[in-house]
Image (tube, coloured by chain):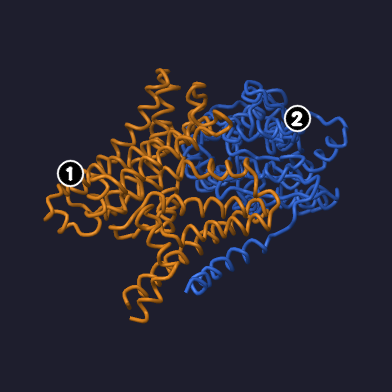
Amino acid sequence: MFELKINRFTVALGVAIALASAGAAKAEDGEYGVLMKTLANPFWGAMAQGVKDGADEAGVKYFLQAAESDQAAEPQLNLCNTMLERKPVAMITAAINSTNLLPCLKAAQDAQIKIVDLDNNLDQAVLDKEGIKVTFHIGSDNIAAGAQGAEYLVSKLGKDAKGPVLVIEGLSGNITGEKRASGFAEKLKELAPGLEIVASLPGDWDRGKAASIANDTLTAHPDLVAIFCANDGMALGAVESVYAAGKGDQVTIIGVDGNSDAVKSIKEGRLNASVAQLPYLVGKQAVENVKKALAGEQVEESIAVPTLVLTKDVLDAGTEPMLQYVK
Amino acid sequence: MAVETARSGLWTRAQRASVDQLHIRLESLIVLIALGAVMAVLSPFFLSLSNFLNILLATSTIGVLVIAATFVIGSGGLDLSLGSVMGLAGVVGAYVAVSLEWPWPLAVAACILAGAAAGNINGQLVTRAFVPAFIVTLGMLGLARGLALVISHGRAIYGLPSAMVYIGQGRPLGIPMPVVIFVATALVAHCVLAYTRFGRHTLALGDSEGAARAAGIRVERHSRIIYTLSGALAGLAGLLFTARVNAGDPTAGINYELTAITAAIIGGTNLFGGRASILGTMIGALIMGVLQNGLTLLAVQSYYQQMAIGAVLILAVFIDQYQVRRESRV
């Protein structure tokens, strides 16, 4: 009877073994751990692809985990703790927020594991306070991305252009959106002082909210010449309002991200430009630089991965070498 | 007669003893141990003290919610608001400590009181307004989450006082504080449910409300206490979460109620009440913890981990039903 009973659990065991052996790769020496926010998003998918290609080229082993969503702060911390048990030589982490992984990063540091801040999610002031030293931060330079938006605008309208400009920021208080907006504003002032920013409002990353802001601003300033949005979603919202008002030819609209919807809209000749982030390149360069750092070479403390201005001309020509990284 | 003798073998006696004295089902314990053995064979990193503590640490927040779920489900109720109430409590605690800058013991108390208050509202509505528990707690799921977002303006509240962070990150004698709190809470809860009159009344209520009423149990009052207790435990879980990530995060605990209910059922709690044990459901929670930990160590992607847990849930209930059918045949 006893044996018969146990037999039933062989079913349960079978399931467990099958699942486990599906991915049962023995851990190897010199492995990198890569922890992302989520993979359920094209941005992180492209970054994971970059990590894979970078690791293949550099001939290093890595294992990648991601939380189930980019809001699962505690599950990500649990994943991080567990990953340390595999004793990786480096942890490349994209923390969900600036504090959730701190206990794990501290433990990694104590175990002499190199820590990389993937996509600039950690706050240097918080790290200093906790006594955590990261090997490097890597990600897009959001100030530079904003500035590139301004450069594109001035190249299109000329440096003597005059007229009102609207800036739609991200979620108020969000550092990424602030950097993009301020990068744009400063560069614009420097290059074309005649273009005046008449309003800079938070669009909360929301397409609908950006559309309303664009609409209201067009009412107040019918001669509006340009709109800069801190991401593509909001830029696409603004596009709708501008075209609905019949001012598609008068207003130049610029977004940031280079996502597939934006690329489509640019090709259709509606959105004028998007400053594309290159997550693929971020992932690839992260792995390459970890290898350098482990070999004892000097690595910059903060690595800025370039961004690329996508316009109809650039997309139609297809000759820009960095276009291959736009996924 | 022949069947009777065959059934009173060593296995049956071991089963009976574990059920009678410890209030656990031996099957779930065997699954847990077997799972641990498989992981230990497959991954050289599984069997270590630090990894064992990791599993307990990763289980601690959800484990406290599992205790709450066990009480409620055992009494024949249902609490779908656990994850949201946990998120709300954490935000309230962080708000009191960071934004109001009140001393940390008040913030800790605020976490638990906020949870208890939400739970009490659930209980009042279920027993006095006669709205089904499913609806009341589903409503509370939205209410509590929304309130957490309102209080925090949709953003995490960072920078808790160090004494509060210690609750989530401290390691007295090398044991993580959340593990200490979780294990202590589980032991107390186990004794309450298994060995006290309160516990017996809880399960009697889950078994049959009519019979419980006839036996003189003040059914409504008892229900309200259970829901309030459930909320308070969700508040404690919120405190652990907040202290672990050093931030009152309004999105904390999304979907945790489902994980908690899953663990309670894997651990042998009857979804319709009447049968529940904290030690049993702790084994359920640990089965999930070991599965997640082991699969992560084996570098299996997290999406497969969710599938594995789903499969284990169905399997656990299947085994349970099979058992019940066999017994009823005798």
Vertical order, A305 against B35 (above or below): above
Q: Residues within 10 Å of mark 2 (few under 14, many from 20)?
A: some
**Tag on residue A111?**
none
* Label 1 to label 2: alpha-carbon separation: 60 Å
From the image, state the color of chain B: orange
Q: Quadrant of residue A15?
A: bottom right
From the image, state the color of chain A: blue
**Residue A263 rendering spot, x and y as whole percentages:** 66, 51
Nearest to the eye among marks 1 and 2: give it.
Answer: 1
For this orientation, the residue located farthest to the bottom is: B2
Q: Secondary structure at mark 2?
A: strand
Q: Residues within 10 Å of mark 1 (few under 14, many from 20)?
A: few
Residue A165 visible within the image: no
**Residue A193 rendering spot, x and y as whole percentages:** 67, 23
Vertical order, A75 against A21 (above or below): above
Q: The disc labelled 2 sits on which kind of residue? A: Ser
Q: Which residue is mark 1?
A: B221
**Tag on residue A302?**
2
Q: The disc labelled 1 sits on which kind of residue? A: Arg
Q: Is there one chain holding both mark 1 and mark 2?
A: no
Say which of B130 and B295 sits in front: B295
Residue sitting at 57 percent across and 66 percent down? A13
**In contact (CB < 8 Å): disc 1 and disc 2:** no
Image label count: 2
Residue sitting at 60 percent across and 41 percent down? A231
Q: Secondary structure at mark 1?
A: helix
Left/right placement of residue B64 relative to residue A34 reads left
User: Which chain letter matches label 1?
Assistant: B
Say which of A85 and B256 sits in front: A85
Residue sitting at 29 percent across and 54 percent down? B134
**Residue B94 rendering spot, x and y as whole percentages:** 44, 27
User: Which chain letter matches label 2?
Assistant: A
